């Protein structure tokens, strides 16, 4: 990130009442910073050299990302809205989510942030969900109280008016890493799940409570329900989400993607048969891309009712996975390094990096060879644009 020209910081309280407002750090390139507010010498957003040629992308495009104050930390504690010039327009900090200890190798937490209603929504370790706007306003949207032995998942309606959440309670481990794996019980009790709903600015309502089974045969991890998004059809979850150390940036973890009833919090149906086509990404209108769990998997784009829209046929033994649907649904980013077109085209992203999202219908974003966020335009697939800071892409906002 380039040097901040000016900032104003208003500290956030961890458990502010729903509906309260704060101001985030607002960055203005026109004013010099006061001495007391100077950037620290070691900053995770220090500038890094970018390419001499920048792909052509709309100057008004802004995106949300998560970042960490501690270099190399897997637990983000900064949310920001930035431009492709690497300058943060607004940013704020929050208490990072650190999942409770479970199993022999720990577990990846569910998504901690989403873009909806022209804002970025993010959760902290206490279960407080806030929104950050492009203007720098931070608002507490809902509170789902969470302790150090609990793990939150949540989703936000596309218009920002409603939220759903789960709180998984993790029992105490009966062992240390030195005695893992083990033959006896791993936990001093059962995993339990509480499912909630809330209107933005209102109090959370408990929908139901249940005991969560452990995955077989290891009995190390729970198989639970995680919320992972909300399209125009309704909330999305993974169920059963058998937790563990696997997964990838911005992707579904642990099991089948399912449709959730927004009123009851219960699973309605899977988007696709998990054994024949595993859902990889869901568009705002409910269309989705799925890949068969085979070595020569095609990329298949389907409507919410499961009917096929288009597919890209793989060569034998050279299948596709880790797929993301472009905003116009005409392309799929697969394997982190190739873009497949509805017209049969295939574009290798020769610039390097591992890509896992779309900035717009012709630009992908991901992590570059140096660990920074970077992007590539489909019109110049060999040209890598370094945004200038490491982080996790959340979604695009249009200024």
Image (cartoon, rainbow, N blue to C red):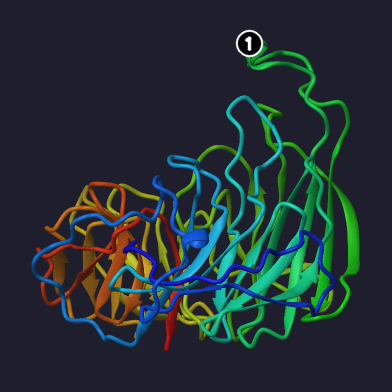
Corner quadrant of residue 222: top right
The answer to whether residue 270 is above or below residue 83 is: above
Left or right of residue 15: residue 256: left
Q: Secondary structure at mark 1?
A: helix
Q: Locate the C terminus and report the quarter of the image it occupies.
A: bottom left
Evaluate whether residue 298 shows in this view.
Answer: no
Q: Locate the N terminus and report the quarter of the image it occupies.
A: bottom left
307 or 395, which lies in front? Answer: 395
Single out the residue that lies furthest toward the front.
Answer: 35
| Residue at 23 percent of width and 53 percent of height | 353
How many marks are shown on the rendered structure?
1
The answer to whether residue 100 is above or below residue 231 is: above
| Residue at 36 percent of width and 62 percent of height | 323
Residue 142 point in image, percent of width and height: 78, 72
210 or 30, which lies in front? Answer: 30
Residue 278 point in image, percent of width and height: 47, 59
| Residue at 47 percent of width and 67 percent of height | 34
Evaluate whether residue 59 shows in this view.
Answer: yes
| Residue at 91 percent of width and 66 percent of height | 206
Residue 235 point in image, percent of width and height: 67, 74
Left or right of residue 340: residue 5: right
Look at mark 1 in the image and give the residue it sits on: 178
Residue 366 point in image, percent of width and height: 32, 59
The answer to whether residue 276 is above or below residue 24 is: above
Single out the residue that lies furthest toward the top.
Answer: 179
Badge 1: how crowded within 10 Å, few (<14), some, or many (20+)? few
130 or 48, which lies in front? Answer: 48
């Amino acid at each position: 990130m380039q040097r901040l020209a000016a900032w104003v910081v208003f500290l956030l309280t961890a458990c502010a009442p729903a509906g309260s407002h704060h101001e985030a750090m607002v960055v203005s390139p026109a004013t010099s910073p006061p001495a007391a507010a100077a950037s620290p010498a070691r900053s995770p957003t220090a500038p890094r050299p970018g390419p001499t040629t920048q792909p052509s992308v709309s100057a008004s495009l802004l995106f949300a990302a998560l970042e960490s104050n501690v270099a190399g930390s897997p637990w983000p504690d900064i949310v920001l809205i930035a431009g492709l010039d690497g300058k943060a327009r607004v940013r704020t900090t929050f208490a990072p989510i650190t999942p409770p200890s479970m199993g022999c190798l720990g577990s990846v937490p569910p998504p901690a942030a989403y873009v909806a209603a022209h804002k970025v929504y993010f959760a902290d370790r206490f279960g407080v969900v806030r929104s950050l706007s492009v203007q720098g306003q931070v608002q507490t949207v809902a509170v789902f109280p969470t302790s150090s032995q609990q793990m939150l998942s949540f989703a936000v309606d596309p218009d920002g008016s409603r939220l759903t959440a789960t709180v998984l309670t993790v029992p105490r481990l009966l062992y240390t890493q030195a005695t893992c794996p083990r033959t006896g019980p791993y936990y001093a009790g059962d995993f339990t799940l509480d499912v909630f709903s809330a209107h933005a600015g209102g109090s959370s309502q408990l929908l139901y409570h249940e005991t969560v089974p452990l995955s077989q045969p290891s009995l190390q991890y729970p198989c639970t329900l995680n919320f992972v998004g909300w399209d125009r059809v309704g909330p999305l979850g993974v169920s059963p989400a058998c937790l563990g150390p696997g997964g990838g940036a911005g992707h579904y973890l642990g099991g089948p993607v399912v449709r959730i009833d927004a009123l009851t919090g219960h699973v309605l149906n899977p988007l696709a048969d998990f054994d024949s086509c595993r859902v990889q990404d869901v568009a705002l209108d409910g269309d989705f891309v799925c890949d068969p769990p085979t070595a020569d998997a095609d990329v298949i784009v389907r409507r919410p009712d499961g009917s096929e829209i288009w597919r890209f046929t793989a060569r034998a033994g050279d299948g596709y996975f880790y797929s993301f649907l472009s905003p116009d649904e005409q392309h799929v980013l697969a394997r982190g390094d190739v873009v497949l077109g509805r017209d049969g085209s295939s574009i290798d992203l020769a610039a390097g990096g591992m890509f896992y999202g779309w900035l717009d219908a012709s630009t992908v974003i991901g992590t570059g060879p140096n660990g920074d966020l970077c992007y590539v335009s489909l019109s110049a697939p060999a040209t890598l644009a370094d945004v200038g800071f490491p982080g996790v892409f959340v979604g695009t906002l249009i200024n």
